[in-house]
Amino acid sequence: MDNLLSLFDLGEAEAAVTQAARVLVILVLAWLLQRVASRIIRLFHDYMAEDRDPEQRTRIGTVEQVLRRFMTVVIVLVAGTLVLGELGISVLPLLATAGVAGIVIGFGAQSLIKDYFNGFFLLVEDQLRQGDVVEIAGRAGRVEELTLRHVRLRDFDGNVYFVPNSEVKVVVNRTREYSHAVADAVVKSAQPIEEAYAVMREVGRVLREDPAFGRVILDDVEIAGVERWEPWGLVLRARIKVLPRSQWEVRREYLSRLKAAFEARGIQSP
Amino acid sequence: MHDFLSYFRGIDPDLRHLILQALRIVAIVVAAWVLHALARHFIRAFRSYMERRVEGVDDLARINTLSRVFRNVATVVIVVVAGMLVLNELGISIAPILATAGVAGIAIGFGAQSLIKDYFNGMFLLLDDQIRVGDVVEIAGKGGLVEEVTLRFVKLRDLDSHVHFVPCGEINVVTNRTRTFATPLIELRLAMREDPDEAFALMKEVAAGMRAESKWGALITDELEIIGFDRWSESAAVLRVRLRVVPPIEQWSVKREFQKRLQKAFAERGIEIALPHLTIFPGQRKDGSAPPLQVVARSSG
């Protein structure tokens, strides 16, 4: 030990000790920061996971993992460069190279980064869920999968759409809380409209009493009225408040019953 | 030990500095080598992970391409950074080099923006498994059968045999028409006076007939799904049904065969498919009587 110390003069030894102390402080600070960040991410996760279904929880878990990893990488990188700087190795070349690479990649990966940001906010704001029927970026379908990078939809024909989250601007969610089955019936112009309305109400009432459909129908038929005048007849519009995702089924059943009822009452359709 | 230390202490400070410098350079090179080995290890792990997820020779070829690209990028980055550090140690100022590289980087970054975007998008198309060779897809407004996927472009061939080369950077939304299963939708306009239930029963019969044949039965995996009376259209009731087809690439042949048979069956039973028809109404006077509707028939020649 004596020998080792005598290797340097006292000034050198002092410098070495201060250097070691500085490195130690940096490492301790990095460790503390890591703990605090991890704590904050956990709090965020708990806050987000409240009142969500299991599928969404797993997704929030994914986000949490991504955040945690991102934090670790940033802290390790910054602490590493600081330590290297303390040890007298110049970090300038590293930073400059990273800067150039960052510019080149940043240009190309612009939309990719946008994907991740948008994906994160879609999740936080709860605009889409798996199983919802939505319209995004001009494509409509049922949401099969949500990731931080894209939304996978399947439409009625079985086509699968991969919509990158950066393309998602306005989200039309057709299955939120409740839906309306909008049914357009067409009768000849000269038919008595009030009578047609009565039949429409009656068919709606019978439909609501049917156990197969009564479960999903939330309210009586609402007659919107004469929607428009077409060359072939009058379009009469009615709507029924239903549980989400059953509006199409209810509309079809209602229309098919209405057609039979109009025929039975002698109300003519074109 | 003692001898060595005293020798070290004894040597001239300039030489001591030189030795330390050499040691630092060796340390940098060793660190770079370790980092490179680590990167290779990670890339190999990624590759075996991807290989477990996919099947087929084409996909394997693509994964090989991808891991080769990753390996090259890792090597270039590590060599460049280590080289910079070594130059710095040797006392050669790297500031001019970096400034030049920075300017070049910005210039190339602007010019090669779409190229870099191609590679990034291509990588994620592969990672997310959105497009496979043999799929029928619609990307960037072009539809067709996928013949080749590289990191830079996707090659499509459409029904006219036109070949489209779509750069991966242009691909936003991918419409894949052949993923796991297909449900071709058939819309039929039925004359208003016909009974929809009768039409549905007939369609079910036709579908059951197709399923009974071994050729079509192997492709149609489920009974005909009656979607129902979809809407009231001009002189027609629009009926919708769906078939479920696996493998999805056969959806068009199944749909066409089904429609052909449907046409025959409807003709045989005399169920009318809606034609647009016109009721001519001459109007009505206030007293309820109708004015005469004069029809003039002329024969030419």
Image: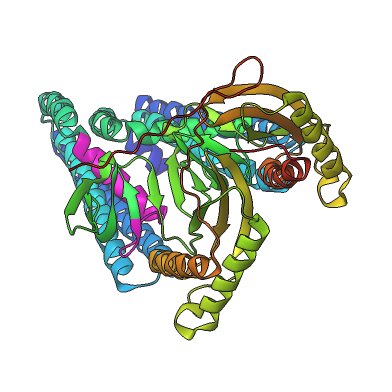
Which residue is drawn at the image coordinates 56% and 23% (left, top)?
Answer: A229
Quadrant of residue A198 within the rendered picture:
top right
Which residue is drawn at the image coordinates 40% and 65% (left, top)?
Answer: B256
Confirm whether residue A3 shows in the render.
yes
Is B182 on the left-hand or right-hand side of B94? right
Span highlighted in magenta in the image? B114-136
The image position of residue A14, as x and y in percent, is: 42, 26
Is B101 contained in the magenta span?
no
Looking at the rendered image, the quarter that the N terminus of chain A falls into is top left
Report the coloring of the rendering.
rainbow
Which residue is drawn at the image coordinates 26% and 40% (left, top)?
Answer: B169
The image position of residue A37, as x and y in percent, is: 60, 31
The image position of residue A242, as x and y in percent, is: 76, 37
Which residue reaches farthest bottom?
B214
The image position of residue A181, as x and y in percent, is: 69, 36
Looking at the rendered image, the quarter that the C terminus of chain A falls into is top right
Which residue is drawn at the image coordinates 52% and 44% (left, top)?
Answer: A147
| Image: A255 above or below B107 | below
| Image: B111 above or below A146 | above
Is A207 on the left-hand or right-hand side of A15? right
Main SS of the magenta segment?
Answer: helix
| Nearer to the camera, A131 or B122 | A131
| Nearer to the camera, A63 or B98 | A63
| Image: B41 above or below B24 | below
Is B250 on the left-hand or right-hand side of A131? left
Quadrant of residue A80 within the rendered picture:
top left
Confirm whether residue B20 shows in the render.
no
